[in-house]
Amino acid sequence: MEHHRVSCLVGILAAAAVAGCSSGDGDGAPAASAGAGPDATVDSAAGSDASANDASAADAPSAADVNAPDARADAGVDGGDPCANSIFCDDFEEYDAGGLPSPTWGANQNGGALAVDETRAHSGRRAVKMSAAASNGYRSVMISLSKPSVLPVANNHLFGRMSFYLDSSPTTSVHWTFIDGYGATASGYHALYRYGGQTPSANGNTLMANYDTPDSYSSPPVGPSSDCYLHSATVVPTGAWSCAEWEFDGPKNTMRFWLDGAAVTDLTMTGTGEGCVHQPKTFTWLAPTFSRIDLGWESYQADPARTIWIDDVALGTQRLGCAP
């Protein structure tokens, strides 16, 4: 289990039988994802490599309890341990303020900058701050995890969780991404499962699931063009810490999303979405083998500056719940 927590050592001294820590090292590299929703421009994806520290966790609730789509996981909520049941967990406390969260994470700073920051944190003192500069088109300011000891997970069925603080959301139609999973499909091309948004409403910018196949933008193209979408009526929260959870179920070509512990059911994608820019509505969102996770801010049309903080990231093979 990969735990990046300063508190992990304290936990060992208090309860050596429950958890352990060891260090690992490797190199991180920038990673950008790409694509767009309806009426959008696109860019292609890039790979990355990263590493993390090792640890373990215990006291997991049953899989039936935490995996129920409409049930809130107890881990990290009632139990108080944000890393319970995870295979990877990072609260960003061990990195130097002002620096990158490396070597655990790769850093993509295309059209902005990111750094470990102490001005705002969900837990402890530090989080990662992504500052996306005003742009006339594509920009990507994201951290990227692709360590082979973490990803892909067994059976390619991945759950994730992060706390995020978004300063503002677009007031015009701008496709943006703050979570994506990338990898190769069984059909020989790469694909992205994404969560973000695009459409403004009276209450804010509404969330959206997106599927894209970035190899189709290469020359010559590889695989099908896609750019598929599934819109939600739920708006992304701004100006406060919120919790995003996601499920990428590769074998079932399924995506699910929870916001602050509640299922956002109109973001559940089971094989197909509302439509695609380059394919019929019946086009299958063929899941890749998820070998990389990107978190931060990426957008594809003209948009003012945006800032997002991310903290308490965890990955697992069952639902993790929100960090306390």
Image (tube, rainbow, N blue to C red):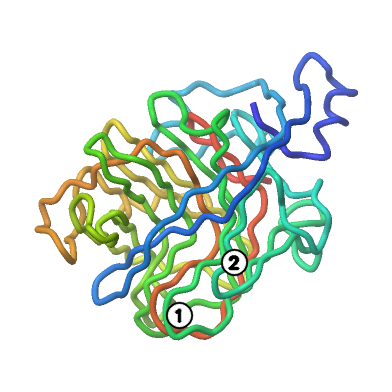
- Name the residue at 75% across, 60% down: 116
Q: Residue at x 71, y 56 (%)?
A: 122
| Left or right, 222 with reference to 293 | left
Q: CA distance from mark 1 to mark 2?
A: 20 Å
Where residue 29 appears, as percent x and y from the top left, is 60, 51
Q: Mark 1 or 2, which is nearer the eye?
A: 2
Q: Dot 2, crowdedness within 10 Å: few (<14), some or many (≥20)?
A: some
Nearest the camera: 86 or 224? Answer: 224
Residue 34 % position (x, y): 39, 62
- Screen quadrant of the N terminus: top right
| SS class, disc 2 | strand
The kind of residue tagged 1 is Pro
Q: Residue 62 location in percent, x, y?
A: 51, 21
Is residue 81 visible in the rendered structure shown here?
A: no
- In the image, 87: left or right of 192? right
Circle nearer the N terminus (1, 2): 2
Tell me the kind of residue under disc 2.
Answer: Gln
Q: Nearer the viewer, residue 261 or 96?
A: 96
Query: Residue 210, can we see it?
Result: yes
Residue situated furthest top in the rendering:
17
Callout 1: few (<14), some (14-19), or many (20+) C-alpha neighbours within 10 Å?
many
Residue at 80 percent of width and 50 percent of height:
95
Taking the image as shown, residue 37 lies to the left or right of residue 225, namely right
In the rendered image, the vertical position of residue 103 relative to residue 225, given as above or below = above
- Vertically, is 135 above or below 223? below
Question: Which residue is painted at 59% across and 23% down in the image?
Answer: 60
Which label is found at residue 170? 1
Which residue is labeled 2 in the image?
109
